[in-house]
Amino acid sequence: MSDQRKLLSQYHPVLYFLAVWMRRIKRYGEWNLDGYKYTSLRTSDKLPFRVKKHQSVLIRKLGDSDMQLQVNKVRNLSIGIEQINGIIIKPGETFSFCKLVGLPTRRKGYVEGMELSFGKARPGIGGGLCQIANLIHWMVMHSSLTITERHHHSFDPFPDCGRVLPFGSGATVFYNYGDYRFTNNTPHTFQINLWLTEKCLEGELRIDKELDYAYHVFEKEHEFLKIGDEFYRKNEIWRNKILKFEGGRIIDTELLTKNFARVAYIPDNYTIKE
């Protein structure tokens, strides 16, 4: 059976507002006192070598969701990527999605897009920015950068529709206490470039020196489960480290994460668990 208990902040909008801003104020303090050196330099000059490139479709049919929210999301993405495009991550620096993008507000041009909150899909100012975090996270997983903060949705709201990445390989953000961060603990300088095409959000991770190794990320142990009256989805995300100039010889394999989340729809195939 699912746990239907609510957080105190869910009982009244004022309590929710206060809870959010208390956590935001705490994060503001951490940004000044936590000892991290955060990225801030952006440049239109691209670093010479590409580590990983990826793209994701801008508009998908997601269940019975309002398609206008999908259209609005594209506008939000266009604003958000301008705060990140060209960002340089030097050795010892930390990338913070929320610190770079800032609080999405109407004054900045953001509109209502779809966001996932408390187990539901609903409209919210700046909704859809998670698509940028998802794309960046997928590229970072293909590098030697160290992920220091990542959150993911606690439920799977829609059946797969053109999904090309493994379930649970994304990253969700909620300004500013639900951040996506990684640190460059390597001797190399990295760069993230983002842009929109007619149909896709596209991005690339670049580096100042060509490396002789690369990473391949893959899924294992994927399964839908029915436990009681609820449906769940689980899998594991792994990656191989391969030598590029030795026929892709695998020199290391590691488990990145295990996922287990409630499913808000009835999957076509599932295993019943007592």
Image (cartoon, grey):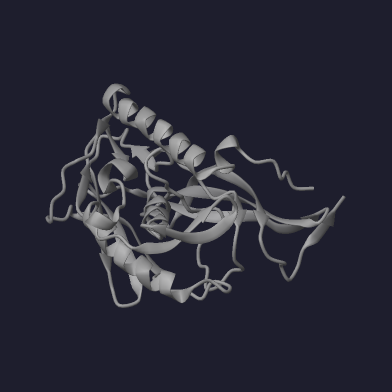
Q: Nearer the viewer, residue 107 or 163?
A: 107
Say which residue appears at 41% left-offset and 50% top-offset. Answer: 137
Count the labels in the image.
0
Looking at the image, residue 233 sits to the left or right of residue 198; the answer is right
Q: Outermost residue, right direction?
A: 274
Percent across and percent down for residue 272 are: 84, 57
Q: Quadrant of residue 35?
A: top left
**Observer able to see residue 166:** no
**Observer able to see residue 44:** yes
Say which residue appears at 19% left-offset and 53% top-offset. Answer: 86
Compared to 147, does 139 lie above or below?
A: below
Percent across and percent down for residue 245 are: 36, 54
Looking at the image, residue 108 sits to the left or right of residue 66; the answer is left
Q: Nearer the viewer, residue 62 or 217?
A: 62
Percent across and percent down for residue 208 are: 20, 47
Say which residue appears at 46% left-offset and 50% top-offset. Answer: 171
Q: Quadrant of residue 186?
A: top left
Compared to 54, does 101 lie above or below?
A: above
Percent across and percent down for residue 198 are: 30, 77
Compared to 63, does 8 lie above or below?
A: above
Compared to 72, does 119 lie above or below?
A: above
Q: Nearer the viewer, residue 136 or 67?
A: 67
Looking at the image, residue 259 sits to the left or right of residue 137; the answer is right
